[in-house]
Amino acid sequence: MMIRGNKKAVTIHHIVQQYHRGRGRASPTITYGFRRASSTIGKCGSTKTPPPSTVVLLRHGQSLWNKIPTFSGWCDVPLTDLGIEQARCAARVMKKKGFNFDAVYVSQLRRAYESGEAVLEVMGNTAKASSKPVKPVKAWELNERHYGELQGFSKVNPELVSIYGEEQMRAWRREMKERPPPMNEAHPYYQPPPAPLTESLYDCQKRVLRYWHGTIVPEMLPQERTILIAAHANTIRSLIAYLDEVPDEEVPHIHIPNSVPCIYKIDSTTGKAIEQDFSPLSKSKGNWLLSAENQERLVENLGVDSESFARSAFAAWDVDEDGLLSKEELMTGLFKWKRDPNPAINALAGKLLEEWNKEEEVADTITLERFQSSAIAGSRKHNLPFFEDELPTSTVA
């Protein structure tokens, strides 16, 4: 691709060479494989509706290029030490909740499959049906979105910004059907097929859903399964958009935190998400598992969807899992937030305590809907930052 300026023609390939000269590179070598989709014909043996399965979506822990940040795409970037610990923290949360996986699917990229392996190592997971250790199934279809020529560049690279402009750079990252310029074989991170030369978010979603319906969903028959998918921001964003039926124009605004489990109940015959027993305020059919270790990441990423964060907090504080918060559970949770080092969480706790203390009588139990309403109203009334309608600028796709 060539861009012409006033004085001379500049190729993006030249910028690639200049940018990567002397810089350490992630290994471009990746092996590929696929697993044949199993047929559902004749598996049920009856007309009974199969029970719903549980799917846990988990973005990998922090990678080296998340930290910089860089267009990672299909580059095989390792996890940081923090990223490994984030995956282990996710495993501890899931283990505490009693999860035991029948199958684990990961991408071919090491940051995803190492996250999946870290989860299984902590959980000591064996399949319920066979009592044999679960081994992750690697699939290139779950790889991150391919960013074409942009792969390996800093997301704020001044040369790219000067050539294309901030608006075009933002469109390539966030618009559903915008494709970055394709790479060619001269690119330092070029890979042969099945690697594409570039992808839009829409392209990424299509391949993810082919694998979802062709391989993962058939594994849910004939009986209930609990499945972990450890992948990437855009592959998980694509699945959440499908499961929650998010309009195309809103898909780029779905933010995925590193290593925070998101739980869905799935209809095994259709592959679609099932409505769970949430309040009328709930927009998503999924539920993020909140913990002391991950709540700051949830705050940063779910700021545009306040009901999701409030629902996650409610579930974490509902110790007896009866679907209600007792006064004791509520106050225990709020006082934990009051001691949190994150000023936004600390502030929200203070405002909620203030609001509830104004009431002459607080009910013995609080419903999810009441808790969500109070959290949303309190945060907006006092203009707390993480429930504003603006997109968080710190999110890295």
Image: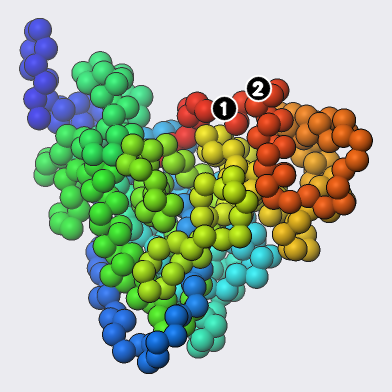
Q: Which residue is mark 1?
A: 388
Asked if residue 265 is positioned above or below residue 124 in the image, the reply reads above
User: Residue at the bottom extreme?
Assistant: 45
Q: Looking at the picture, tell me which residue is in the foreground, 231 or 154.
A: 231
Q: Residue at x 35, y 43 (%)?
A: 247
Q: Residue at x 65, y 26 (%)?
A: 380
Tag 2: amino acid: Asn
Left or right for 369, reference 260: right
Left or right for 127, reference 252: right
What crowding class fits label 2: few (fewer than 14 Cα within 10 Å), some (14-19), or many (20 or more)?
A: few
Q: Residue at x 9, y 8 (%)?
A: 7
Q: Quadrant of residue 106?
A: bottom left
Checking the image for residue 276, the label placed there is: none
Residue 226 visible from this viewpoint:
yes
- Where's residue 342, x and y in %? 69, 33
Left or right for 23, reference 301: left
Residue 84 visible from this viewpoint:
no
Left or right for 1, reference 234: left
In the rendered picture of this protein, how many numbered marks are placed on residues? Answer: 2
Callout 1–callout 2 Cβ contact below 8 Å: yes
What crowding class fits label 1: few (fewer than 14 Cα within 10 Å), some (14-19), or many (20 or more)?
A: some
Q: Secondary structure at mark 2?
A: loop
- Where's residue 154, x and y in %? 34, 30
Q: Quadrant of the C terminus?
A: top left
Q: Which residue is mark 2?
A: 383
- Where's residue 368, x and y in %? 69, 50
Asked if residue 213 is positioned above or below residue 170 in the image, the reply reads below
Q: Secondary structure at mark 1?
A: loop
